[in-house]
Image (cartoon, coloured by chain):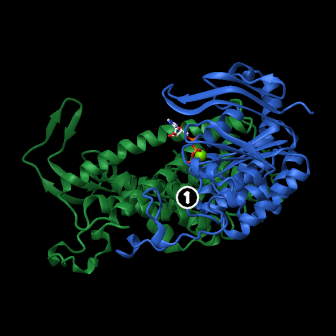
Chain colours: A blue, B green
Amino acid sequence: MKKPIFDLSAVSYRYHTAIPAIEGISISIQPGESLAILGANGSGKSTLLHLLDGLIFPNSGTITAFGKILTEDKLETEDFRHFFRSRVGFVFQNPDIQLFCSKVYDEIAFGPLQLGLPEREVVKRVDDVLDMLGISSLKDRTPNQLSGGEKKRVAIASVLSLNPMVLLMDEPTSSLDMRTRHWLIVLISELTKAGKTIITTTHDISLVKQISSRVIVLGEDHRVLADGTPHEIISDHELLHRANIIHEHETDTFGYTRKPEDLPNEKKIIGFPHSSANKNE
Amino acid sequence: MIPDWLAQDSSSVPLPAPSNWGRSGFVEKTIDNAAHFLKDTMVNETVARRNGLLQAIDPRVKLITVLAIIVSVSIMRSPIIIWGIYGFTLLLAVASSISLMFFIKRVWLFIPLFSAFIVIPALFNVVTPGDPVWTAFHLAHSYDFGPYHIPDTITVTRQGVLTAVTFIGRVSASVSLAVLLTLTTLWNDLLQALRVLKVPRIFILILGMTYRYIILLVHTVYDIHVARKSRTLHYGPTGSEQRWVASRMGYLLKKTYMISQDVHNAMLSRGFSGDVRTLTPSRIQGYDYAWCIFVLFICVFSIVLDRTLVPW
Ligand SMILES: Nc1ncnc2c1ncn2[C@@H]1O[C@H](COP(=O)(O)OP(=O)(O)OP(=O)(O)O)[C@@H](O)[C@H]1O
Ligand SMILES: [Mg+2]
């Protein structure tokens, strides 16, 4: 068995040392794995990715990355920071946070430039990524002039240009249209084939089969509820229900087959396909 | 399943008295203005994206040459030459596909603000003694306050008018040049051009981010406002609106703080280490050199002409 890329032992994290977000998580992630982290809103998915990217550090327990214990001090050293940042890329949940440059082109060039790549290489990478994502026409825009889905694409581009061997993606398909979503699924599987390690978070079970070979379910108590193959997880309805990822009557995970008459459970969400709020204008 | 009240037909809600219709409050106007400002910055960008004389020039070259003309204008004395430069900026505007009316309006919006307080007193012999052109009024006798002398006849002097005309010309030429620079250059390119003035990279990055997030926050305010508007049936008294704005401001401040932390994380994640690296900007081309020589010629020629017209 290969040496794991990430090894977490009994990791806990609390915001402001009071709000629990991650509780006693022990997992290890192998190189080349495609891992989906499944969990309801607030279960700690984003927090886990922030921990893996060395942006926050556990209150207790340890995270080992590439065989070294990840600490704030270690990431302050020039050598390790360069080593770690060039290998791990993170697509944030909110693209407005991720896109801080004033031009799309500079945004995509930012990462490779900070890592000191030669300029010719940077320019080539930026052009290739722009091309690959079909966003060349946006390169002179400012992020304020982009739609939500376009921002997401630029955010993905700005991380791909780093060519990271580990890609952390927080809700990558949110706000993407069906075509772009499909394109992203294809991209993820190609990156997996190329040997990259892909860690995505989602609460969309229809996605996990397509983008992952292993699924971790986070419960609402911020602990790991289950760890298995997509098939095992998706067929375990009791588990998914406990994690608040599906509701009792959703027998088909790909379609919503709720009937209005069997909705006695108060936890259910009633979808209003066309909000009447905006008709008041 | 849903509560009874939700199932009811809301068309039974009575129509309010017409006096409440269409009244827009202070908040609404302010936010509309903010939205207008946003649109305006978009307009700026559309001009910068057109094909034209100034748009084609490298931003660094443009910045330096515009500064050179402004400095030249500031040392000129002849109103004829100064107004000549103003005319030159109008030509530049036309050559850069800017509508002349739009350009003139934009410049002259500023000028009364700048100059009214300086120009009006300067017209009179109280400030600028000289040959009377027009008598304003007579005083009983003249006054002396220490070094200040107020004559018994207040007149507009020829020298005063000349000073005023020169001053206004200088201001309008300089403002026109600055407006030309900002209209024909993308904000981001202008920021990068500051590098030639030895402004540090990190400072430029921060300026760019500030601009980006100010716009994001204005969008947020606008969204909050629209969201509230869609749920507002009638406007309350101004006091309640102000309280609402105050509470939103608190929220925004908190949000700004959170954004700044998250953005810092996003920068760290992509290898930022306190020292920014940027791409070297594109080469300066033949066209840019030609423009430099042209501007140099204009500056030297007009200063020489200026000194022959007003040789003191
Ligand atoms: N900056 C913060 N300050 C305080 N508490 C936070 C902060 N960020 C997250 N939390 C809390 O930590 C817990 C985990 O949050 P996290 O963002 O990791 O959830 P998530 O699984 O990513 O949810 P979502 O699906 O909504 O993105 C939540 O209870 C949340 O309220
Ligand atoms: Mg999240």
Point 49% across, 65% down: residue: B39
Q: Is residue B121 left or right of residue B84?
A: left
Point 36% across, 41% down: residue: B250
Towards the viewer: A35 or A244: A244
| B101 w.r.t. B68: above or below | below
Q: From where the camera sits, is residue B128 visible?
A: no
- Residue type, mark 1 in image: His
For ligand 1, give the image quadrant.
top right
Q: List x then y, in percent, for residue A160.
A: 79, 49
Residue A140, quarter of the rendered image: bottom right
Q: Counting other residues with Cα less than 10 Å from the Cα at mark 1, is it few (<14), some (14-19), or many (20 or more)? A: many
Towards the viewer: A246 or B151: A246
Q: From where the camera sits, is residue B291 visible?
A: yes
* Residue at the farthest top position: A73
Q: Is residue B32 left or right of residue A181?
A: left
Q: Chain of mark 1?
A: A
| B92 w.r.t. A119: above or below | below
Point 66% across, 70% down: residue: B50
Point 27% across, 69% down: residue: B5
User: Where does label 1 land, which residue?
Assistant: A247
Residue B84, quarter of the rendered image: bottom right
Towards the viewer: B47 or A17: A17
Q: List x then y, in percent, for residue B290.
A: 78, 59
Q: Quadrant of the N terminus of chain A?
A: top right
Q: Secondary structure at mark 1?
A: loop
Q: List x then y, in percent, for residue A202.
A: 66, 52
Q: List x then y, in percent, for residue A254.
A: 67, 66
| B51 w.r.t. A268: above or below | below
Q: Number of marks in the image? A: 1
